[in-house]
Amino acid sequence: MAIDLEPGWLNVLQDEFKKDYMVKLRHFLQEEKQQGQVVYPKNADIFNAFNKTPFDKVKVVILGQDPYPGAHQAHGLSFSVQKGIAIPRSLINIYKELETDITGFKKPAHGNLEGWAQQGVLLLNATLTVRAGAPASHQKKGWEIFTDAVIKKISDLKEGVVFILWGSYAQSKIALIDQSKHFILKSVHPSPLSVERGFWGSKPFSKTNELLEKQGKTPIDWQIY
């Protein structure tokens, strides 16, 4: 697993890559491939969230749990899939909420969210890899230690970041965030299993822009092009 990381992130995270848990995680990923397992996303995309959203640019964090385990889906950004791939149901629901929350939003024909990432929305999964066809297969192998450190670094070193936390797993990370200088927007997960219990009408996107504008920051253009 080669580490090709945006310089700002490398500066704040370089010590993590030297720790024992990361050495063990590298060995685990090597063993998976030696055993013939297909791992998503491809190596070059594992740290895509960081490379698309430099540390200095982070204004918003949307936290997911795992990469999608299907072929050609995952490309290192939470909730996002590559162009040409069917839009996952959770993302369809996110688009439906956007249509009611953001005036003029039109449901896009694809699920690639890179446009958000390039504006400062860190699309971070708690676990950065997965075995093909096996959801949650790379949980508790070390990735969560790394991404917890990422959340803590953002909390410690930045101010006024909006954390969008959907579902109980994402909300379990609240303890890592200094709420005296950051903002938390939370609701149930947009999954079809929970969406009816409070995701509709939660307006996370307009609320995020209001919080950014109050700080004099440029709001996010949520339209996917």
Image (cartoon, helix red, strand yellow):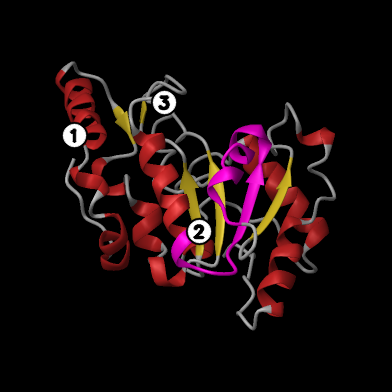
**Residue displayed at 22% across by 40% down:** 19
Marks 1 and 3, how far apart at CA: 16 Å
**Residue 177 appears at what percent x and percent y?**
56, 52
Q: Residues within 10 Å of mark 2 (few under 14, many from 20)?
A: some
Magenta stretch: residue 176 in it? Answer: yes
Check disc 2 and report the residue beneath it.
Answer: 155
| Mark with earlier residue (2, 1) | 1
Element at badge 2? helix
In the rendered image, residue 212, in percent from the top left (x then y), is placed at 66, 73
User: Is the Cβ of the residue at disc 2 closer than 8 Å to that at disc 1?
Assistant: no
Residue that carries the numbered disc 3 in the rendered image: 139
Q: Nearer the viewer, mark 1 or mark 3?
A: 1
- Residue topped by disc 1: 23
Q: Amino acid at mark 3?
A: Gln
The range drawn in magenta is 155-178
Give x and y (percent) for residue 78: 50, 45
